[in-house]
Amino acid sequence: MIDIVKAENAFKKYLENYDVNDGRVKLKVVHTYGVVEISEYLAKKLNLSKEDTELAKLIALLHDIGRFEQSKAGNGTLDIADEKLFDHAEYGVKVLFEDNLIRNFLEDSSYDNIIYKAILNHNKIQIEDGLTEKELLHTKIVRDADKIDNFRVKQTESFKVLFGTDDIDYISSQNITEKIYKDFMNEKLINIRENKTCLDRWSGYIAFIFDMNFDASLKYLKEHDAVNKCFDRIKYTNPDTIEKIKKMRLLANNYIDKRLEK
């Protein structure tokens, strides 16, 4: 049995270990609650049972626990760019299940395998093979919810937090490297380890649309004009980048429309 209120209270107590006024920590706190909200939204759109809805919310609540624990490990950063060196999903399941932190949030161990698999796979380029139907369902929900809220993050957070610099002239003058551009135009997720510029990383955020599992996810993004808002946040000054962005924007919006037509 899942007591989501108890889990949420445990999470609030857990956050007492952190300075939630720190910009990077605050980002992850707000993001966590955003993913919880969107996971509930998707569960309702999918007509899931109350049990599965509560489970989806619990997984969302814990999906980035590795980000918080990361700062304890002496790394000192919660920036997504650090993913090149640190896999927060793998660290998250370690502290939850090897260090038994999970029992602070949920007494019932019967959900452990689903929670483990969903959190472990939430940030991967591809979902691992061999998951059960229930594990796959909840992995897809948290992956979509995570990506959807990341569009909000990229629209609202400072460039200093997102890129490590608030030099907008530096950011807007950069190029999108050919490998990243080709992957985007081939409707592929961008591998963060292949990013070379800030705009490579920005392209990767928008490419999240190519990995949405549910029509409800794409519909949510379209209704909030999330893709165009992300494209528009940066005023590109590099002529080559301007041309690439035009083509990427057209492809992205057409992709969503075609998916929703089916």
Image (cartoon, grey):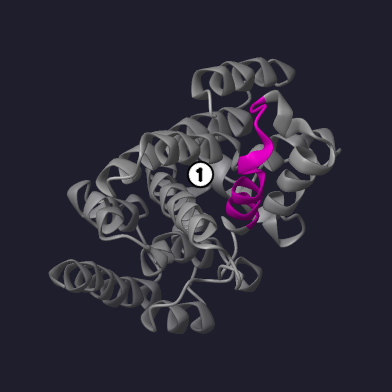
138 or 243, nearer to the observer: 138
Vertical position of residue 14 compared to residue 74: above or below: above
- Residue furthest to the left in view is 261
Q: Position of residue 216 (x, y in %)?
A: 26, 54
Q: Residue at x 54, y 21 (%)?
A: 8
Vertical position of residue 236 compared to residue 160: above or below: below
Left or right placement of residue 85 versus residue 174 in this view: right
197 or 1, nearer to the observer: 1
Left or right placement of residue 165 versus residue 222 in this view: right
Q: Residue at x 76, y 31 (%)?
A: 101
The three-letter code of the residue at mark 1 reads Phe
Q: Position of residue 118 (x, y in %)?
A: 58, 52
Q: Position of residue 23 (x, y in %)?
A: 59, 29
Left or right placement of residue 226 versus residue 58 in this view: left
Please check the rendered image and state whether residue 23 is part of the magenta-colored stretch, yes or no. Answer: no
Is the N terminus in the top left, top right, bottom left or bottom right quadrant? top right
Please check the rendered image and state whether residue 110 is part of the magenta-colored stretch, yes or no. Answer: yes
Name the residue that disc number 1 marks.
Answer: 159
Helix, strand or loop status at disc 1: helix
Q: Residue at x 51, y 39 (%)?
A: 60
Structural crowding at the residue carrying mark 1, measured as other residues with C-alpha within 10 Å and reported as few (<14), some (14–19) or many (≥20): some
Vertical position of residue 42 compared to residue 206: above or below: above
Query: Which range of residues does the magenta coloring cover?
Result: 105-120
Left or right placement of residue 144 versus residue 115 in this view: left
Q: Position of residue 55 (x, y in %)?
A: 49, 38
